[in-house]
Amino acid sequence: MLRLPALCLSALTWGLLMAHPALAAADAPVYGPELQGFDYPYTLQHFAFESQGTALQMGYMDVAAQGKANGHTVVLLHGKNFCAATWGSSIKALSEAGYRVIAPDQIGFCSSSKPEHYQYSFQQLASNTHDLLDKLGVEQAIVLGHSTGGMLATRYALMYPGDVERLALVNPIGLEDWKALGVPWRSVDDWFAREVKLNAESVKRYEQSTYYGGRWKPEYDRWVTMLAGLNQGPGHNVVAWNSALIYDMIFTQPVVYEFSKLQMPTLLLIGTADTTAIGSDIAPAEVKARVGHYNVLGKQVSQQIPHSTLIEFEGLGHAPQMEEPARFHQALLGWLSKPGS
């Protein structure tokens, strides 16, 4: 059984690190187990609830329309190596266009609780999110999910179809079933052994090669620091353990077989240079060569979703909303402005 030492001391340890910065790594910031010390672009609030017999909290931002309010709410669901904070430019664009915007951090991620024991499923995360929206008085929403958030957004739309006005997916992972295509299974223990070694260098190397086609912009460094600083802070072991559980959830709970059941208008926003495929780093060469082709996957899945629109960003990678935000938001807002699209 995995031992997670000194988890009960994480808050004290965090306080010591803040009081004595020399205790932290000299060349990079570290953050608390719930990302304490990292600046969010809008006011961070907290939703307290109980799940699986444990008291938990979800961090979230709830931003009112800055322009003339149009009466619609957009819920933004982040990806695996992202946080609600990475939606900053999208929150600004959507709120200025008249939308209320809610961006939560899911349990196990970023500013939210990292339980030592939790049965992760997309159904559970969708239920948590639904409870948050109920608490905030949101009965219907436009749901926009990126990366792993795209898998979650799909599951949310399948579970609560009457509550989803429209669905938008930005380079969602899970457009294929990696296990069925031959990618080897990893145990949670193996995922943990991998995640506990995570550092800024390894994060940047992975994201640059997989997400951005070898390209890099200085503004991405903030998100590398966010992820590495969380992992290397006082919550190191429990952060890595939750990450391992989440990777197991992603790999073993495909949504690709249910896209045809989505009945609401759905937008696919796809950077075609993306090559993300969970577990491909340990796959045989012939398997690795046939997974993660978003230039093909976007078109395939668009054909499966009954009321879908596909917008491709030629040459962009895993996060087009971060690579070319102006172009991305023009496409998104254009689709949202069309009745019934």
Image (cartoon, grey):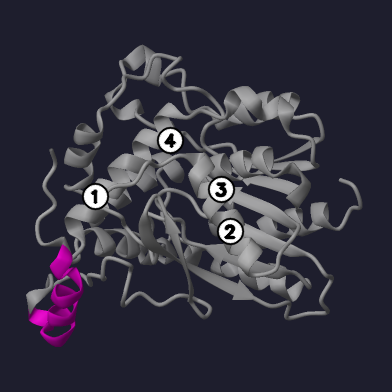
Q: What's the residue at 57%, 43% (across, down)?
A: 150
> What's the amino acid at mark 1?
Ala
Of mark 1 and mark 2, the one earlier in the sequence is: 2
Of mark 2 and mark 3, the one earlier in the sequence is: 3
> What's the amino acid at mark 2?
Asp
Please tell me which residue lies in front, 264 or 231. 264
Question: Mark 1 = which residue?
Answer: 240
Q: What's the residue at 35%, 34% (across, down)?
A: 248
Of mark 4 and mark 2, the one earlier in the sequence is: 2
> What's the amino acid at mark 3?
Ala
Mark 4: which secondary structure? helix
From the viewer's perspective, is 224 left or right of 257?
Answer: left
Question: Mark 3 = which residue?
Answer: 126
Q: Which mark is residue 250?
A: 4
Question: What segment carries the magenta color?
Answer: 8-22
The CA span between labels 4 and 2 is 22 Å
> What's the amino acid at mark 4?
Ile
From the viewer's perspective, is 89 left or right of 289?
Answer: right
Q: What's the residue at 56%, 48% (across, down)?
A: 126
The CA span between labels 1 and 4 is 15 Å
- Any part of residue 288 in sight: yes
The CA span between labels 2 and 3 is 9 Å
